[in-house]
Image: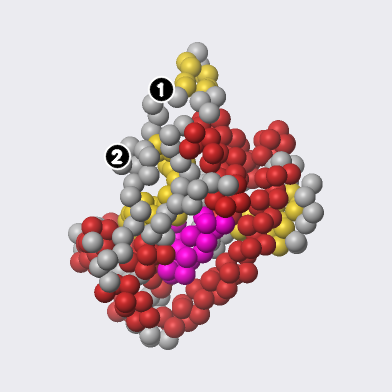
Amino acid sequence: MVQGVKIHSKVAAQAQAELFTDEALKFLAALHRTFEATRQSLLVAREDAQRRFDSGVPLDFPPETAHIRAEPSWHCAPPAPGLEDRRTFMADFEDSSSPTFANMVNGQINLRDAIRRQIDFETGGKKYKLSENPAVLIVRPRGWHLDEPRVSIDNQPVSGSLFDFGLYFFHNAKELVKRGSGPYFYLPKMEHYLEARLWNDVFVFSQSYIGMPHNTIRATVLIETLPAAFQMEEILFELRNHSSGLNCGRWDYIFSFIKKRRADRSAVLPDRKDVTMTVPFMDAYVRLLIQTCHR
């Protein structure tokens, strides 16, 4: 076991033995020790922002980044191999996955095996296996606000984001490139462009750590919080060398609207069945995202 790293669960013992090699745990420890302090400061900043919203400070586009929004010359990286045509499959460690430790580690094993075309399944006399040309794989790690409490480093729980990203990247990045694809991610729940900067720093560090060329990683950002809707250009700018665009997330965006404007009696929403994508504030959100990406 790597010094300072502790695993607090014995479930899925075989999967753990295959995933938690000394080298993989050293990488997780390096990620944690390099970026955990920044993550914590950004989570505190979220709480500070909520207090400002509760006191009546309106949401607006950040004045300190006006130069980014006004500068037309910068652009994002071109599509990476396999992303020119978005026929993709998203493997989700976030909303659609129950975060039991068995699910998290067995999910990593399944991804490893799928990438190497070594996965199949038989039930009821039927056999299932991957096609010869499966969809391009994109992985959604947990958001910055979530911990992985079953793993601690230096007596602190590791970030769920870094746990999901780190194990997948360490075990599969080079194999993906060898097969004509790459390590591609779908990043949820960000609330500020500095959180995108943290992801970019993680990408740069990780590529250097395993000797992979910079800008190999690609990430699509899910704009699903109200503050992020006012910082789309800044988020793209921070990730510009690793970006594969933005996407909308309806239900979490509505939830974020309710949460962020909880103290504003003029911002009470009707039943959710009436909050469709055609209501003005949702339509404006979608149109701004499309306009930002096209620009």
Q: Is residue 194 magenta?
A: yes
Quick one: label 2 or label 1, which is nearer the N terminus? 2
Which residue lies under the disc numbered 1? 132
The crowd level at tag 1 (other Cα within 10 Å; few <14, some 14-19, many 20+) is few
- From the viewer's perspective, is residue 271 above or below residue 131? below
State the extent of the magenta-drawn residues as a range: 188-205
Q: Residues within 10 Å of mark 2 (few under 14, many from 20)?
A: few
The picture places residue 223, in percent across and down from the top left corner, at 36, 60
Under tag 2, what secondary structure?
loop
Front position in the image: 17 or 75: 75
Q: Which mark is residue 85?
A: 2
The residue under the point 49% across, 36% down is 176
Lateral position of residue 236 relative to residue 282, left or right? right
Q: Determine the residue located farthest toward the top in the rendered image.
A: 125
**Which is more toward the observer, 164 or 260?**
164
Which colour assignment does the render follow?
A: secondary structure
**Residue 199 % position (x, y):** 50, 60
Disc 1, SS: loop
Asked if one can make out residue 104 in the rendered structure from this viewpoint, the answer is no
- What amino acid is at disc 2? Asp
Residue ID at (41%, 23%): 131
Using residue 9 as the reference point, say whether residue 292 is left or right of it: left
Q: Is residue 191 magenta?
A: yes
Q: Quadrant of residue 224?
A: bottom left
Q: Horizontal placement of 67 versus 54: left or right?
A: left
* Residue 189 in view in this figure: yes
Q: Which residue is more in the foreground, 99 or 77?
A: 77
Amino acid type assigned to the residue bearing label 1 in the image = Glu
Q: Main secondary structure of the magenta part?
A: helix
